[in-house]
């Protein structure tokens, strides 16, 4: 049981909901009526406030802008057929948030602030949770350093916030992926396992280069040999080879421990697959393709859920797939969605009622 936290709530005078069409809504463009904000100073967290969504004022010397102590999470809330709103595995995101905080030398956020804050905020903006298929409320907790000082050191002050965004699917169509061999996302000992804002900024150049050549995202490979696959764009990646599903393991600290990744492994096992978390080389993937054993390839993430990959290019070797004929990733998505949208039993206790 977590301790109750005092939250100061100031409600918006007039909801903006009627200005927004919740159907086919683009990812991350609209925000709900309220947000949560709390500051850390003198070694402790201050008053937790929920207030109307608004701009914040920052100094040009704000430490986060200069040295990148900034982390975030992605969580989703779903509406079930009875109209109730439930959040998918928020405790797992809470734990990962604090792992990211520790790696970036930031204070951890107490569980009561994170969980009670999330719950209260969503209760207040529950009308914003869409009910259309494949739609949900994307929850974005984040924290950044707020010292107004440009000396390089861990900041003494921080701000933790939560904002909410009703959203439709992140990727609408199967993706074309370029296997990256020049740039790297993560190295052992680095911050690859953390949801640090800089990981996403640092990936943008390679992704832009791939996009110039008609690809949607890159498949990151290891920094030393560009041989072992890591993540795909902002997602974890899965390969169905024969009757086994393989996803890169988390051992080297180069891969984000995705909450969707973990859930997908559970559901795949329930579907009868052997699931292996291990090093997977691009050579093994190509060999499986040549042998006709590479059946389906997909990425997983909170925002992306399960995104099919229709083309994978490594140097001049192109692997093309007819995703219309795939069955397993679609069944996986349906099974996971049924739990999230409350049409199948929640046997794993993944759904958190608000
Ligand atoms: C997520 O899946 O929540 C992500 O963080 C990916 C992206 C929107 C940054």
Image: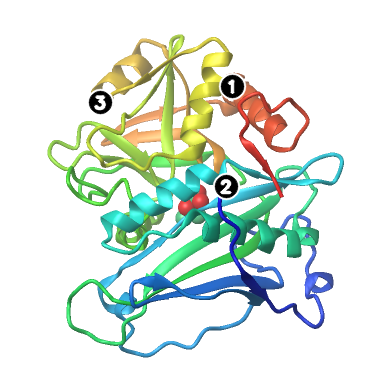
Q: Which disc, if any, is residue 166?
A: none
Label 2: how many Cα within 10 Å (few below 14, some 14–19, many 20+): some
The residue singled out by tag 3 in the image is 281
Q: Quadrant of residue 207?
A: bottom left
- Mark 3 or 1: in front is 3
Q: Which disc, if any, is residue 171?
A: 2
Which residue appears at 69% of the width and 50% of the height? 136
Q: Secondary structure at mark 2?
A: loop
Could you say which is closer to the camera, residue 153 or residue 19?
153
The residue singled out by tag 1 in the image is 326
Label 1: how many Cα within 10 Å (few below 14, some 14–19, many 20+): some
Q: Secondary structure at mark 1?
A: loop
Which residue appears at 74% of the width and 59% of the height? 123
Can residue 336 be seen here? The reply is yes
Looking at the picture, the colour scheme in use is rainbow
- In percent of width and height, residue 239 lies at 42, 24
The answer to whether 48 is drawn above or below residue 60 in the figure is: above
Could you say which is closer to the camera, residue 143 or residue 246?
143
Quadrant into which the N terminus falls: top right
Which residue appears at 43% of the width and 60% of the height? 109
Q: Secondary structure at mark 3?
A: loop
């Amino acid at each position: 049981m977590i301790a109750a936290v005092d939250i100061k709530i100031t409600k918006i005078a007039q909801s903006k909901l009627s200005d927004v069409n919740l159907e086919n809504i683009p990812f991350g463009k609209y925000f709900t009526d309220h947000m949560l904000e709390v500051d850390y100073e003198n070694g402790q967290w201050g008053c937790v406030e929920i207030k109307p969504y608004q701009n914040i004022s920052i100094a040009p010397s704000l430490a986060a802008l200069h040295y990148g102590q900034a982390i975030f999470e992605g969580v989703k809330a779903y509406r079930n057929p009875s109209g109730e709103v439930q959040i998918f595995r928020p405790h797992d995101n809470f734990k990962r948030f604090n792992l990211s905080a520790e790696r970036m030398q930031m204070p951890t956020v107490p569980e009561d602030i994170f969980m009670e804050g999330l719950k209260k905020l969503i209760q207040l903006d529950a009308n914003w949770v869409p009910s259309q298929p494949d739609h949900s409320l994307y929850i974005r907790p984040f924290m950044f350093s707020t010292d107004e000082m440009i000396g390089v050191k861990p900041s003494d002050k921080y701000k933790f916030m939560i904002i909410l965004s009703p959203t439709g699917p992140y990727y609408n169509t199967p993706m074309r992926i370029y296997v990256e061999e020049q740039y790297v996302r993560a190295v052992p000992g680095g911050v690859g396992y953390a949801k640090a804002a800089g990981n996403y900024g640092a990936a943008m150049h390679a992704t832009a280069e791939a996009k110039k050549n008609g690809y949607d995202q890159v498949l990151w490979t290891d920094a030393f040999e560009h041989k072992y696959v890591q993540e795909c764009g902002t997602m974890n990646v899965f390969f169905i080879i024969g009757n086994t599903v393989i996803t890169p393991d988390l051992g080297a600290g180069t891969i984000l421990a995705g909450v969707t990744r973990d859930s997908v492994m559970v559901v795949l096992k329930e579907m009868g697959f052997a699931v292996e978390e291990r090093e997977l080389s691009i050579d093994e993937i190509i060999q499986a393709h040549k042998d006709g054993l590479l059946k389906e390839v997909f990425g997983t993430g909170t925002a992306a859920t399960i995104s099919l990959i229709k083309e994978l290019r490594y140097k001049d070797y192109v692997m093309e797939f007819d995703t219309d004929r795939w069955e397993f990733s679609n069944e996986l998505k349906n099974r996971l969605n049924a739990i999230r949208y409350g049409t199948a039993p929640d046997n794993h206790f993944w759904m958190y009622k608000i």
